[in-house]
C-alpha cells in the first residue's frame, strides 16, 4: 500500500478520500486554493499546500502546480476525486511520468471511454446496444440532417466531450436542427474547449440506470450492481438509489453483464461507471462511461458494504480484487439526495454565503458526506454541492420514510438549499411507486 498520497480536489470528496486514507494508514497531503484556506477539513490532512487563487484554472486545474506539490511532499500517488482533473488522460500520464501513481484507470482506457463518440465504438465491440445515432462526431450540418432523417425525430445533439448536461440540445423537427447544432457547438467549445458534437435518437421518458464496476491490473472485473439516477434537473442528477425500482431481475442481470463486457473491452482498472438509458419496454442503451469515482458512489457502498475509495487505492497499489462476483451482496435499499446551496424559489441560482446555523440528521442507517459546518463560508467559485445525505434501510419503502424523516430534521440558515425540492420528490406518489422518468422534476412545476 502507498505510504502517502496527494488529494487533488476539495470539499466533500477530499474529506471522503482522506477518511479512507486514515483507515488504511496512508498519509494524506491536501492541496487547496486561497478560497478554501479556512476550511476545517484541511486540519485533518497530514500536510496541506496552497496551490493558487480561487479560480480552478489557477489552482485545482493547474496540473503543473499539483505535480510540483506532490513532488515536494514526497507522495507515491495522486487521487483526483471527481471533476477537475479526474478524467484528464494527459494528467494521468503526467503523474506516471513523474513516477507517481494516478489513482484511476490507465490513460489509454480514459481516452477510449472519455470521449462519447469513441465510447460508442467500445460499445459496438462489446456487443452492447447504443442509442441509434451518428457513427462519430458530425462532419457538417448536412450529415446531421441525413442521420436525423434516418433515425427519425426527436433527436438529441450532444457534445463529444460533454459532461454535467452541458452542450446538449433536444430537437423535435428538421427546422430546429441547424440552430441546435450551432448552439450546442458554441456551448461545447466554451465548456470543454472542444466544439465537436454528435447526434442520437432522443429516447422518450427514459430512466437513467448506471452500473458500478471495479477492475484491477490483473484483468479481473466485477460489477457492484446498479444505481438509478432518473431523478434529474436539467440532466443533472438530484436523487440516486440502488437497487433500481424500475427494472426486473432479468434486465438487471443483462445490464450488469453488459457493463462488465464494456469494462473488459476497455481493459478498465479502478472504479468506473457505465451509464445507460432504459426505455419504457426495459430496453437499455449505453450512453457514456465515467472513468472516475462518482458523486453518488455512497449508494453502492451502503448496499454492498464495500468501500470504493479504499478499493481504488488498493487497485492502484497493485492489489488484486479479493472477492468473486458471486460474493458481492446487495442488501436492502439506499437513497442519496444531493444537497446543493441553490435557491429553489429563484430558478435554482447558486446561494453562496456563510452558514450560521446547521442541524445534521442522524440515527440508524443515515450518512451525511459533507465538509460544511456552522461558520463555513460557501464560495461562489465552485459547484454548489454542500453535502450528500444517504440513507440505508431493509426495503425501499423504509428508505424513503427514513429519507423523509432526515430531510425534515435537516436545517440550515440562512443558505437556501435543494432540501425542499427533495421533500417534494420523496413525498411524491410517482416516486414512491418507482414510476418516474428523467423529466419528472421539470414536470413537478
Ligand atoms: P453528461 O455527460 O452531460 O451528463 P449524459 O450523456 O450522461 O450527459 O446524459 C445526461 C442525461 O441526459 C441522461 O441521464 C438523460 O437524462 C439525458 N439524455 C442523454 N442522452 C439522451 C437520449 N439519447 N435520449 C434522452 N435523454 C438523454
Image (cartoon, rainbow, N blue to C red):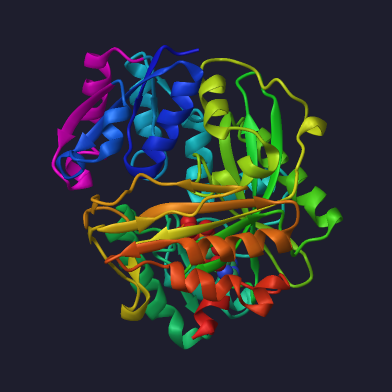
Question: Foreground: 187 or 140?
Answer: 187
Q: Is 68 within the magenta?
A: yes
- Horizontal and vertical percent position of residue 329: 77, 38
Tell me the quarter of the picture where residue 405 sits. bottom right
Question: Foreground: 61 or 302?
Answer: 302
Tell me the quarter of the picture where residue 303 sits. top right
- Horizontal and vertical percent position of residue 97: 35, 17
Q: Which residue is drawn at 28% across and 52% down?
A: 374
**Left or right of 155 on screen, residue 430:** right
**Left or right of 181 on screen, residue 367:** right
Answer whether residue 199 is visible to the viewer in this image.
no
Residue 137 to residue 281: above or below: above
Question: Foreground: 234 or 185?
Answer: 234
Q: Residue at x 45, y 13 (%)?
A: 2
**Left or right of 102 on screen, residue 392:** right
Tell me the quarter of the picture where residue 89 sits. top left
- Horizontal and vertical percent position of residue 242: 67, 53
Residue 202 to residue 31: above or below: below
Answer whether residue 250 is visible to the viewer in this image.
yes
Q: Which residue is drawn at 36% across and 54% down?
A: 386
Which residues, given as a range, are shown in magenta?
47-75
Q: Which residue is drawn at 34% across and 59% down?
A: 195
Amino acid at each position: 500500500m502507498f505510504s502517502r498520497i496527494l488529494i487533488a480536489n476539495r470539499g466533500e470528496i477530499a474529506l471522503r478520500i482522506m477518511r479512507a486514507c486514515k483507515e488504511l494508514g496512508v498519509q494524506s497531503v491536501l492541496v487547496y486554493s486561497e478560497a478554501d484556506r479556512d476550511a476545517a477539513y484541511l486540519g485533518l490532512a497530514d500536510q496541506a499546500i496552497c496551490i493558487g487563487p480561487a479560480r480552478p484554472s489557477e489552482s485545482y486545474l493547474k496540473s503543473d502546480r499539483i505535480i510540483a506539490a506532490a513532488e515536494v511532499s514526497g507522495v507515491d500517488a495522486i487521487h483526483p476525486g471527481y471533476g477537475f482533473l479526474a478524467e484528464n488522460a494527459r494528467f494521468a500520464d503526467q503523474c506516471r511520468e513523474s513516477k507517481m501513481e494516478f489513482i484511476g484507470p490507465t490513460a489509454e482506457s480514459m481516452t477510449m471511454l472519455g470521449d462519447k463518440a469513441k465510447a460508442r465504438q467500445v460499445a459496438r465491440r462489446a456487443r452492447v446496444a447504443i442509442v441509434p445515432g451518428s457513427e462519430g462526431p458530425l462532419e457538417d450540418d448536412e450529415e446531421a440532417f441525413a442521420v436525423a432523417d434516418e433515425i427519425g425525430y426527436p433527436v438529441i445533439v450532444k457534445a463529444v466531450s460533454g459532461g454535467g448536461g452541458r452542450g446538449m440540445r433536444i430537437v423535435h423537427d428538421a427546422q430546429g436542427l441547424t440552430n441546435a447544432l450551432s448552439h450546442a457547438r458554441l456551448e461545447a467549445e466554451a465548456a470543454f474547449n472542444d466544439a465537436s458534437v454528435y447526434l442520437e435518437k432522443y429516447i422518450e421518458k427514459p430512466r437513467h440506470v448506471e452500473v458500478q464496476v471495479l477492475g484491477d491490473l490483473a484483468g479481473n472485473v466485477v460489477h457492484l450492481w446498479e444505481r438509478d439516477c432518473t431523478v434529474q434537473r436539467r440532466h443533472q442528477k438530484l436523487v440516486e438509489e440502488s437497487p433500481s425500482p424500475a427494472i426486473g431481475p432479468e434486465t438487471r442481470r443483462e445490464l450488469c453483464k453488459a457493463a462488465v463486457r464494456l469494462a473488459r473491452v476497455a481493459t478498465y482498472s479502478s472504479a468506473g461507471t457505465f451509464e445507460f438509458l432504459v426505455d419504457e419496454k426495459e430496453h437499455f442503451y449505453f450512453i457514456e462511461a465515467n472513468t472516475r469515482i462518482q458523486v453518488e458512489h455512497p449508494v453502492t457502498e451502503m448496499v454492498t458494504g464495500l468501500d470504493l475509495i479504499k478499493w481504488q487505492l488498493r487497485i492502484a497499489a497493485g492489489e488484486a480484487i479479493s472477492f468473486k462476483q458471486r460474493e458481492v451482496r446487495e442488501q436492502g435499499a439506499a437513497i442519496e439526495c444531493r444537497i446543493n446551496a441553490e435557491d429553489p424559489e429563484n430558478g435554482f441560482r447558486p446561494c453562496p454565503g456563510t452558514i450560521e446555523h446547521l442541524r445534521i440528521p442522524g440515527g440508524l442507517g443515515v450518512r451525511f458526506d459533507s465538509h460544511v459546518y456552522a461558520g463555513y463560508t460557501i464560495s461562489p467559485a465552485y459547484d454548489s454541492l454542500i453535502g450528500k445525505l444517504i440513507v440505508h434501510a431493509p426495503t425501499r419503502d423504509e428508505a424513503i420514510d427514513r429519507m423523509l424523516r432526515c430531510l425534515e430534521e435537516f436545517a440550515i440558515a440562512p443558505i437556501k438549499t435543494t432540501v425542499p425540492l427533495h421533500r417534494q420528490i420523496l413525498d411524491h406518489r410517482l416516486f414512491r411507486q418507482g414510476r418516474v422518468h428523467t423529466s419528472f422534476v421539470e414536470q413537478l412545476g
